[in-house]
Image: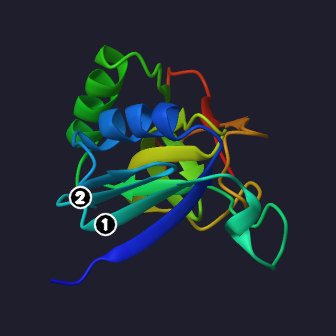
Amino acid sequence: MSRVQLALNVTDIDVAVDFYSKLFKTEPAKRRPGYANFAIAEPPLKLVLIEGGAGRGTGVAGALNHLGVEVESAEEVQAATRRLSEEGLEPDVEESTTCCYALQDKAWVNDPDGAPWEVYTVLADAPDEIDLGCSTQGCAPVEPALPAGARSDQSASSACC
């Protein structure tokens, strides 16, 4: 089995483990002082949490933009939104938003150290981009794309990116 590993520095291992257990519906595979790892089946991910920020190494400060889990349908985004709400994580929901040159439905939550996570699905390709970056900052209202001759009685939705 192959999977991506994501190692994150966290300020409080207990708070981070609580958050990620809720986000991914699983408990850590291993816990040690200042350390936890999760062997997540869906999506396939090895998530490693290391308490303390000194281990980041060199590179661009603040290089992490956001993290996400892509799901197959809007219904799965809605189910994740309900589950995260029940866990007390208060997701910020965006529907039919343009992000990363794609029309998407998504729900955002921030981890205890402020890293933004999205659960999202791509509804369609989008030829234009509002602003690259795909964070929950800087969202602007846009009119939804409609077929020629169609009109919308809906208000503008929020677009992110």
Amino acid carrying label 1: it is Leu
Q: Indicate the secondary structure of the residue bearing disc 1.
A: strand
- Seen in the image, is 79 located left or right of residue 158? left
Marks 2 and 1, Cα distance to the nearest angstrom? Answer: 5 Å
Please say if the residues under marks 2 and 1 sit with CB atoms less than 8 Å apart.
yes
Whether residue 108 appears in this view of the structure is: no
Whether residue 54 appears in this view of the structure is: yes
Query: As displayed, is residue 77 above or below residue 59?
Result: above
Displayed quadrant of residue 105: top left
Mark earlier in primary sequence (2, 1) = 2
- Residue under numbered circle 1: 45
Residue 36 rendering spot, x and y as whole percentages: 40, 53
Q: Nearer the viewer, residue 124 or 20?
A: 20
Displayed quadrant of residue 110: top right
Q: Which residue is pictured at 84% across the width and 66% down the height?
A: 61
Displayed quadrant of residue 83: top left
Residue 40 rendering spot, x and y as whole percentages: 23, 58
Residue 38 rendering spot, x and y as whole percentages: 30, 56
Q: Indicate the secondary structure of the residue bearing disc 2.
A: strand
- Residue projecting furthest to the bottom: 2
- Seen in the image, is 26 located left or right of residue 112? left
Query: As displayed, is residue 26 above or below residue 47?
Result: above
Quarter of the N terminus within the rendering? bottom left
Q: Nearer the viewer, residue 99 or 134?
A: 134
Q: Which disc, if any, is residue 91? A: none
- Residue projecting furthest to the front: 33
- Residue under numbered circle 2: 40
